[in-house]
Image (spheres, helix red, strand yellow):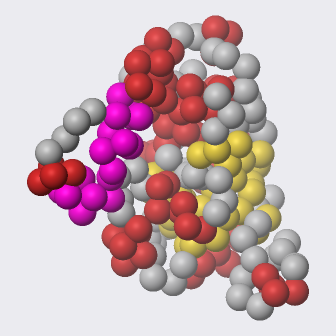
Amino acid sequence: MNLDAEHEEMLRRVGRHPDQIAARAANWAKARKMIRKPVARWPAFDPKWDCDEASFYLSLDGESQESFNSLYPQGVCCSEVDLSELDRRLCALSQRSATEIWGFDDAKVAEAIRFWAEGGEMTPPMIVLVEGTSELHVAGGNNRLSVVRAKGVARIKILVRRDELAVVKDLLPSLREDTPTAGQEEAGVLAK
């Protein structure tokens, strides 16, 4: 992809490099072949999660690192939870069944399948409390959840706001924190 300097500068300002745009087009050419295929015709893969804090902003598709940091100044941690338990606590807007894979954003679903099938790691879904309730909302990553649900994955990684972690742990007893808190990293201890 040959872009003029002004366009390239604009892409850089929004966090994209022209090489990323070209790579995305090539990836889409592969991914679109997956759209509407039943799970039995998907390539074999085990979903792998990217729990590097530097990647957490990717959980909210299209947000920049700066925007993510301003939305979650208190920080976010990566945790593991039983998917069935999480599903029982999701608000109506965030709920999907294992058969509701296609029809919301087919392109994102197909890209997730392709990315995982090629051995990639994806940022876990961002889960937040619904204010004034004991329900949870998928702030980013519902299509990733649809894929793992359809594959029958029992435990998944999720991202949780640090200031909501205690309440979310009460709602999801199977939740185990993977991201070390301050002080634990130096000691090599994970909060369990």
Would residue 12 be counted in the magenta stretch?
yes
At x 45%, y 27%, the residue is 27
Q: Position of residue 72 (x, y in %)?
A: 45, 76
The answer to whether residue 181 is visible is yes
Seen at 38% across and 43% down, the residue is: 20
Q: Which residues are magenta?
A: 9-25
Q: Residue furthest bottom?
A: 183
Q: Nearer the viewer, residue 96 or 101?
A: 101
In the rendered picture of this protein, how many numbered marks are placed on residues? 0
The picture quadrant where one finds residue 155 is top right
With respect to residue 190, does 56 lie above or below? Answer: above
Q: Nearer the viewer, residue 84 or 62?
A: 62
Q: Please state, as top left, top right, bottom left or bottom right, where the N terminus lies in the image.
A: top left
- Compare residues 57 and 71 and report the one nearer the observer: 57
Q: Is 169 left, or right, of 129 in this rendering?
A: right
- Quadrant of res 189: bottom right
**Closer-to-camera residue (171/41):** 41
Identify the residue shown where x is 57% and y is 21%.
99
Q: Position of residue 124 (x, y in %)?
A: 60, 52
Q: Is residue 49 magenta?
A: no
Q: Eyeballing the image, is 55 above or below 22? A: below
Q: Which part of the image, by quadrant, shows the C terminus?
A: bottom right
Residue 107 x, y percent position in the rendering: 39, 27
Main SS, magenta region, reads helix
Residue 104 seen by the camera: no
